[in-house]
Image (cartoon, rainbow, N blue to C red):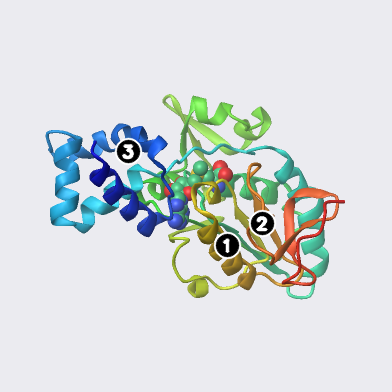
Amino acid sequence: MNVTDFELIAEILKDRSGLSLNKEKAYLLESRLNPVARKWSFSGFDELAQAIRTKRDEALLVDVTEAMTTNESFFFRDQKPFDQFSNIVLPHLLEARAARRSFRIWSAACSSGQEPYTLAMLLKEQAQKLDGWRVEIIATDLSNEILDKAKEGLYSQFEVQRGLPISLLVKYFTQVGDRWQIDDSLRSMVKYQKFNLLHDFSSLGKFDVVFCRNVLIYFDTPTKTKVLDSISELLPPDGFLYLGGAETVLGTSDQFQIMQGQRGIYSLATDRGEKVKAVG
Ligand SMILES: C[S@@+](CC[C@H](N)C(=O)[O-])C[C@H]1O[C@@H](n2cnc3c(N)ncnc32)[C@H](O)[C@@H]1O
């Protein structure tokens, strides 16, 4: 791959998905885009790059962008955030939203659905307490292909073995051939829609809890700041933000602070504009 092709495709990816690729990652372009070249019947990467350069076909650019996303996800990823959800976030919402009996959760880069379905399982496990409540889980992603997989809710043996307790597998999944189908009762709890984190957030409405995990790592700092600042506009003063284990607001956004003693969950900064508080 020549430098011009790399720069052109990297720029397109940055504009369309926020992905920030440096030259050390050039090998990723070829390995991930070769299947796209085959799908479009190009002789190889070079012809694909030429088509990108000359045609700018929207469907081709969508395929290229989606092929470059990393969709790695698993149930109960990192475990602790979901323990915190059950032990801290949910009890808080049950108390603080008792008058209106509703709250909304956003899984902001949901990939193949393991994150929103983990939340659905946790809520289902507390169904008695939530009787009469209206709880919405909105799960969004940039990629059509991965959203189709999420909606289908069909997982391989490998996928259900990663993080999902066997008791919940038995309770909420049915084996179909060599795969596992999640129950309709959980599927119907999650509303999927396509949404690009680079776009305007105003159509989404407000949320009480936002999971934006393991996606900001692919963005450069100004893009992270923009996304985090936009999320802060959607949260009430007692809302919660979850980031991935390798992600932080430190040095990126002063709209959030780490919740005292709860590494991994962020709340709106009490004095937004001031530097983030130290962890308790
Ligand atoms: C590594 S997965 C994270 C999945 C899940 N949140 C988790 O932590 O397991 C990252 C997801 O972010 C999505 N993504 C990448 N860029 C995006 C963007 N600009 N807007 C929305 N989603 C994006 C990808 O399609 C991918 O499914």
Tell me what residue is drawn at x 13 percent, y 38 percent.
42
CA distance separating discs 1 and 3 = 26 Å
Q: Secondary structure at mark 3?
A: helix
Question: Label 2: how many residues lie within 10 Å, few (<14), some (14-19) or many (20+)?
Answer: few
In the image, residue 143 sits, relative to residue 40, either above or below, namely below
Tell me what residue is drawn at x 57 percent, y 26 percent.
161
Amino acid type indicated by mark 3 = Leu
CA distance separating discs 1 and 2 = 9 Å
The picture places residue 68, in percent across and down from the top left corner, at: 36, 43
The picture places residue 238, in percent across and down from the top left corner, at: 77, 68
Q: Nearer the viewer, residue 225 or 244?
A: 225
In the image, residue 33 sits, relative to residue 88, either above or below, namely above
Q: Secondary structure at mark 2?
A: loop
Residue, disc 1 = 225
Asked whether mark 3 lies closer than 8 Å to ligand 1, one says no
The picture places residue 241, in percent across and down from the top left corner, at: 68, 58
Amino acid type indicated by mark 2 = Gly
Q: Secondary structure at mark 1?
A: helix
Which of the two marks, 1 or 2, is nearer to us in this view? 2
Q: Which mark is residue 81?
A: none
Residue, disc 3 = 29
Q: Nearer the viewer, residue 76 or 228?
A: 228
Q: Is residue 156 left or right of residue 210?
A: left
Q: Nearer the viewer, residue 73 or 169?
A: 73
Q: Earlier in the sequence, mark 1 or mark 2?
A: 1
Question: Label 3: how many residues lie within 10 Å, few (<14), some (14-19) or many (20+)?
Answer: some
Tell me what residue is drawn at x 57 percent, y 62 percent.
225
Q: Is residue 52 left or right of residue 272?
A: left
Residue, disc 2 = 251
